[in-house]
Image (cartoon, helix red, strand yellow):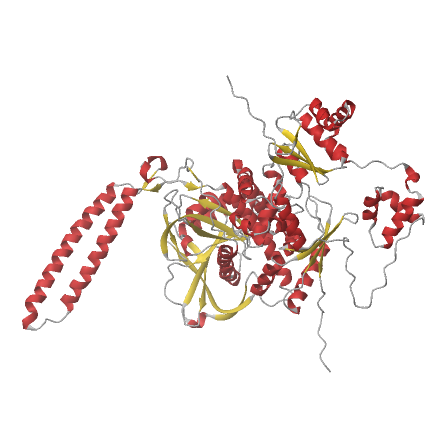
Amino acid sequence: MPQALLPIIPAGATPINDVISVVREGGQWTYFCGVQPVFRHADGDRRSFHMFTAQLCCQGVCTQAQVRRCFGVSKNSVLRSVAKYRQEGVEGFYRARRGRGPSVMTAEVVGQAQQRLDLGRSRGEVAEELGIRYDTLGKAIRQGRLREPIPPPAEAGSRMPAPGPVAASDKSARSQADAAAGEQMGLACTRPAERVLAAIGLLPGGAATQFQSCRDVSYGGVLCALPALAENGLFAHLASLPVLSGYYRTLQVILLLTYMALCRIKAVEQLQYDAPGELGKLMGLDRIPEVRCLRKKLSQLSRNEAPQRWAAVLSQQWMEQSPELAGTLYADGHVRLYHGRQTSLPRRYVARQRLCLRGTTDYWINDALGQPFFSVERPIDHGLLEALRHDVVPRLLNEVPGQPTAEQLQADPYRSRFVIVFDREGYSPAFFREMWQQHRIACITYHKYPKEPWPESEFAETQVRLHPGEVLSLKLAERGSWIGDRRQGLWVREVRKWTATGHQVSLISTAYGQLGTENAGRLFSRWSQENFFRYMMEHYAIDALNEYRTETIPGTSRPVVNPAWRQLDGQARSLKAKLTQRQARFAALTLHPEPQPSEIEKWQRQKTDLREQIEQLEYQLTGLKEQMKSTPRHLAWDELPQEHKFQRLAPSRKRLTDTVKLVAYRAETVLTMIVREQLAHEDEARALIRDLFRSDADLHPDEVAAVLTVRLHTLANPRSNRAIQHLLEHLNATEFTYPGTNLRLKYELTATPPTHHTAPS
């Protein structure tokens, strides 16, 4: 016989049934599911009472008879509430009642409204407090039945602050409210009704974005990035990501990831060290999701390769927005190191550490300003050229805008579709020839094997313009050169730079339609991509692991190095190094003058020993070379022994967070370029923008005027304040609306910096 479940009812509670109970205390009604509180309303809040009891009945949690028996309400009252819930939902209980015409504005209501207007209240606040429609109040003002106070005229040169709410919460009050909410539903969960609805599946659209009037909100300056984020497509293509259910929507999760990147919160786990309520105020929520919830949301957003599709759409948009920058593309590999134990990734040479370490290689495509377009992950990597051939070039042929037509290419034999710039790793005359003859793609790189130095008389001072706008004076010389052998080689433009030490740096190019100085400017702009890698590792943690999960590498036709051949090759290299060392010692003894008669015997014995060791090593090396000839150097992935197979790091969540970081970096770059108009150096401008993102701000929403005022605090010095004020003028000109609301963002500085300084007399 099955055992019946004992009812779990809190002490002092009145049971509705064995599961649901209610407690009336301190003017509040609190409903419990078991011992957990799930809903609360004030003693006289009839709307919330009818809404929640009807919801319990519709969800099958309790019956109508149990509600009538517990609360003593009539049968018709419960029936009406249930019918309204089924027809109109939660909104039906809170929808404002329609007014009854002019009779609403009685003499008593007019007097109360005039008192509130004289106190400086806005029309929206007065209408809400008196329970009348906003249009009715406005009509009374237009008819002269009510009057609004006229603000005193401002003094010359002064700025009137924007009117804000009567009572704006400070950080201390918000902290106390968040802590008090933690005793009921969780820290900073100050919107319990919506959370209960989301928990039982009755909040399909997620939590609404509702801003509150707040002072000194942490990281409030990050809201200045919103127009730049929208310009870079952060909100335009979210439909390509899965739709989240529950309290937090897709837009809110993506916004949180973006704020984290801009505020240098480099990992999801670091959110536990920031006040969740403060970050929630930036998003119009009570709090941000906790770490475990956010991980779950990221997993849902990363399903079915949705981040890869989202990143591809954004890359296409960025190229179309800057076709002049997309005409010259910079390709380079970046090794993401892996120190975990989930899988044994192959070793890669890491140039920045000059070591061979385990990791996976990503090949990045950037523009001349260092701004990224996309990256290609290569768990099985055979170098830059192989990645360009199979992954990068086919994609660029489809996505680069403004490519010439076949007729234009035929009419001009020196015209190219676009230009790819890379370092010496991609030097290959056969690859240059293939790209030009098959696709008409020009390549620029350093000459890996330059010939004899050119005479200094050929070099001349030349002005070279880099893509960021910087102009350098360099000593350059140019020739036409043949690289490669007679079958696979081709003619290229070779430009050499004369350095201060007399060394000649050689670059080669198949961009025949461009001047040599233009080719030099493009190649010498490669530092922007190197700076991008360094900056993203330091400030955006681009190499950080987002999850520890690994995946099986899908079926691939790419060959992998045979472990048996790699072992033989390592042994051969070791023998060759030992042989070279002993040959050098034998040559030194042979070429050295004959020793003294007393040392001749020792000298001959040393030569004999070295000759025997050399012969033995040569014999072993010959045998290893024969084994290497009979051992295939590469194997198909399916032919690789199981003990040597490895897995790849799970890419989807990493792709999602990386895409958000790329949008954040591009937005930061846009703001830096605006601030740079007031500052001399880019590094100084970026540092100022970083400080702006992490600074506090006041938030003042005005629902009537549909404006959200973001009032920033002054920075460290007048020069920084002038630069930020210059930025805010640009941002206000965009008239950007906060996503998911009708509130137009308005940016202000608490004190306007002077535009110039007057010299003392």
Say which residue appears at 88% left-offset and 46% top-offset.
138
Q: Where does the image place residue 631, in percent across and percent down from the top left?
A: 26, 41
Can you see residue 401?
no
Q: In the orientation shown, which residue stands out farthest toward the front? A: 12
Q: Residue at x 18, y 60 (%)?
A: 583
Out of 4 and 531, give the one closest to the viewer. 4
**Is residue 715 among the parts visible in the rendering?**
yes
Q: Left or right: 350 with respect to 287?
A: left
What is the count of numbered marks?
0
Q: Nearer the viewer, residue 398 or 597?
A: 597
Q: Nearer the viewer, residue 359 or 67?
A: 67
Q: Position of residue 258 (x, y in %)?
A: 59, 49
Q: Kindly identify the residue that appears in the image at 48 percent across and 67 percent down.
A: 476
The single residue placed furthest to the bottom in the displayed view is 761
- Image coords of residue 57 (percent x, y): 68, 25
> Residue 615 occupies which quadrant of the picture?
bottom left
Q: Is residue 2 above or below residue 457?
A: above
Classify residue 687 as left or right of residue 113. left
Q: Nearer the viewer, residue 190 or 194?
A: 190
Q: Is residue 43 left or right of residue 422?
A: right
Q: Is residue 240 above or below residue 165?
A: above
Q: Quadrant of the C terminus?
A: bottom right
State the image coordinates of residue 149 (x, y, percent, origin top left).
Answer: 88, 56
